[in-house]
Amino acid sequence: QLQLVESGGGLVQPEGSLRLSCAASGFTLDYYVIGWFRQAPGKAREGVSCISSVDGSTYYADSVKGRFTISRDNAKNTVYLQMNSLKPEDTAVYYCAAVLGFATVQAMCVNPDIFSSWGRGTQVTVSS
């Protein structure tokens, strides 16, 4: 059974950093696009960053460019999201998701509905 488990969330002050991890089991990252999505209270789920395991292509939402970095470790079957210079507006539940790659990461990451496997999420709270 395909499973994704997020970890690394918590409470952090503005300008602080966190690293989220998404551990995959039941499948390998080959041929998959892995995405990080977030959902704040009262807001729709949005794509934050995605990475393709086929060619390493990445996507970042405009709101996180220059602050967040997505990476993968195929040996550990894990995808990471390094979050620096965190802002209160980054507060949300962060989810990782996976789907077989069929288009560019840019086209896929803006559409949460096409991702077939989801983790349960990890809370990130940025507050002073």
Image (cartoon, rainbow, N blue to C red):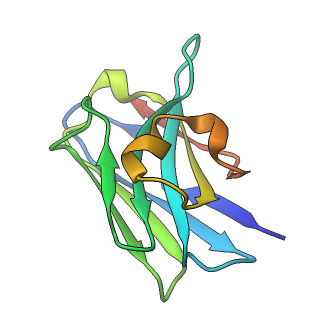
Point out residue 32 in the picture as x, y percentages from the top left corner. Answer: 56, 67
Answer whether residue 128 is visible to the viewer in this image.
Answer: no
Residue nearest the observer in this picture, 11 or 86:
86
Q: Is residue 126 above or below residue 9?
A: above
Measuring 51% from the left and 59% from the top, which residue is drawn there? 34
Q: Is residue 12 above or below residue 70?
A: above
Point out residue 42 in the picture as x, y percentages from the top left corner. Answer: 58, 10
Residue nearest the observer in this picture, 2 or 120:
2
Point out residue 110 in the picture as x, y percentages from the top left corner. Answer: 46, 35
State which quadrant residue 113 falls in.
top right
Extreme residue toward the left, this view: 66
The C terminus is located in which quarter? top left
Extreme residue toward the front, this view: 103
Point out residue 50 in the picture as x, y percentages from the top left corner. Answer: 42, 52
Answer whether residue 61 is visible to the viewer in this image.
Answer: yes
Q: Is residue 107 left or right of residue 101?
A: left
Measuring 36% from the left and 73% from the top, which residue is drawn there? 55
Residue nearest the observer in this picture, 85 or 104:
104
Extreme residue toward the top, this view: 42
Measuring 19% from the left and 39% from the top, which residue is drawn there? 85
The N terminus is located in which quarter? bottom right
Measuring 65% from the left and 60% from the top, which residue is drawn there? 5
